[in-house]
Amino acid sequence: MANGHRSQIKRERNGQKDGRPFAKLVYARIPVQKACFVMDAIRGKDVEAAEALLEYSPRYASDVIYKLLKSAVANAENNNGMNAANLFVAECYADNGPIMKRIQPRAQGRAYRILKRECHLTIILDEKGAAGKTKEVSEDTDAQKTEETVSTAKAKKETKKAAPAKKAAAPKKAAAAKTKTAKPATKKAAKNAEAADNK
């Protein structure tokens, strides 16, 4: 293989795995669009609030996603040793699965297509404290960036102020040099200039 042995590739891939607890349900008999209505409602919410929303939601997908959320919480408690009270829904999404194609008989011997859609559901949880730390770090870096941009903007303004003064001084010097080095083109002009100086 070009990229290395299969075991080496798997080792590298496992080293980059996300350590957050998750639960996944594949081939759920729900269309992606209907599942996304429920997923959007619980995204970013605490586990308790998400469970309450799913328990009393009238949509069919809410029952399936409720069980999936319970599974994710159990994985977090048993595998990662996390406290369920500190967990929230960090990510949740639905991917397209295979589509079963069926036929509905219609008039005059026609057959209409029925599409029975499936999807793959994923819920990823995270602890509130870990997310807060990352937010604090990002805020610190943002503050540093803003300070740097302010300092660079000030430096640019100072250089712009100094530049016009230099430009204004340059034409005066050039004019003085021209007057010193300028020689009269004709003898008559030279005589006139001498007479003007004598007066």
Image (spheres, helix red, strand yellow):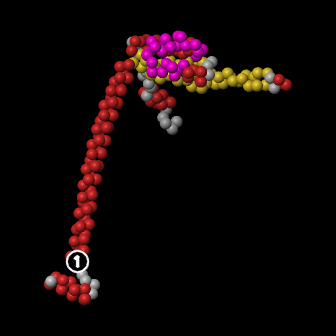
**Residue at the left extreme of this rendering:** 198
Q: Residue at x 49, y 11 (%)?
A: 52
Dominant secondary structure of the residues highlighted in magenta in the image: helix
Magenta range: 38-61
Percent across and percent down for residue 50 are: 48, 15
- Assign a secondary structure to mark 1: helix
Q: Residue at x 41, y 16 (%)?
A: 87
Q: Residue at x 14, y 84 (%)?
A: 198
Residue carrying label 1: 181
Instruction: Judge from the rendering whether residue 180 lies leftward or rightward of residue 57; answer left or right.
Output: left
Is 117 on the left or on the right of 53, as rendered? right
Image x and y of residue 156, in percent: 29, 49
User: Which of the 4 quarters of the picture holds residue 97?
Assistant: top right
At horizontal 24% and vertical 81% (from top left) the residue drawn is 183
Seen in the picture, residue 10 relative to 148 is either above or below; the reply is above
Identified by mark 1, the residue type is Thr
Outermost residue, front side: 199
Q: Is 168 covered by the magenta stretch? A: no
Q: Is residue 150 left or right of residue 73?
A: left
Displayed quadrant of residue 119: top right
